[in-house]
Image (tube, rainbow, N blue to C red):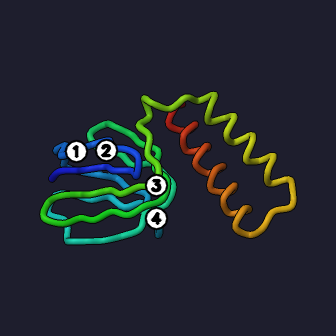
């Protein structure tokens, strides 16, 4: 099967062949193998893996159709691109923001930033 990974800002992977993809599904980790049934699902912040490559992904969708996996993500970074110090600083700033008075929307926003920073740091370890 083939995989494409796209964000609003760039195309990270186009048509790479793989036998297996692990994805952070909204209801838990998903593993997609060749000949998988057609599927459209939401993704959550987590780690996407295939062919030994690992990506930090932040929310999105996956479509599996005709032996093709298409990932549309809000953000996505390959482990080799991640700056651990920058991720640590992003987590620290988000944690500071959570100490103040926030609306529910702002609280959720900073919780997601912390989660994304932790995933990014995990991939650099």
Q: Is residue 101 left or right of residue 104?
A: right
Graded by Cα atoms within 10 Å as few (under 14), some (14 to 19) or many (20 or more), the crowding at tag 2 reads few
Circles 4 and 2 in contact, beta carbons < 8 Å: no
Gap in angstroms between the C-alphas marked 3 and 4: 18 Å
Gap in angstroms between the C-alphas marked 3 and 2: 12 Å
Q: Which residue is mark 1?
A: 14
Q: Which residue is mark 4?
A: 28
The residue shown at (55%, 44%) is 119
Circles 1 and 3 in contact, beta carbons < 8 Å: no
Which badge, 4 or 2, comes first in the chain's sequence? 2
User: Horizontal and vertical percent for residue 96?
Assistant: 81, 46
Circles 1 and 4 in contact, beta carbons < 8 Å: no
Q: As displayed, is residue 87 above or below residue 102? A: above
Circles 2 and 1 in contact, beta carbons < 8 Å: yes
Q: Is residue 24 left or right of residue 13?
A: right
The residue shown at (39%, 50%) is 7
Graded by Cα atoms within 10 Å as few (under 14), some (14 to 19) or many (20 or more), the crowding at tag 3 reads some
- In depth, the one of 31 and 4 nearer the eye is 4
Q: Is residue 44 left or right of residue 14?
A: right
Gap in angstroms between the C-alphas marked 4 and 2: 25 Å
Gap in angstroms between the C-alphas marked 1 and 3: 17 Å
Q: Which residue is mark 2?
A: 11
- In depth, the one of 94 and 35 nearer the eye is 94
User: Horizontal and vertical percent for residue 123?
Assistant: 50, 37
Q: Which residue is mark 3?
A: 74
């Amino acid at each position: 099967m083939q995989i494409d990974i796209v964000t609003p800002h760039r195309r990270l992977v186009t048509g790479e062949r793989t036998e297996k993809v692990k994805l952070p599904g909204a209801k838990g980790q998903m593993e997609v193998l060749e000949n998988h049934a057609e599927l459209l699902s939401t993704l959550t912040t987590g780690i996407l893996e295939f062919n030994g490559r690992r990506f930090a992904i932040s929310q999105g969708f996956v479509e599996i159709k005709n032996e093709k996996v298409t990932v549309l993500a809000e953000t996505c970074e390959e482990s080799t691109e991640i700056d651990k110090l920058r991720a640590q600083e992003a987590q620290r700033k988000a944690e500071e923001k959570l100490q103040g008075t926030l609306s529910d929307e702002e609280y959720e926003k900073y919780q997601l930033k912390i989660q994304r920073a932790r995933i990014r740091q995990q991939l650099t370890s």
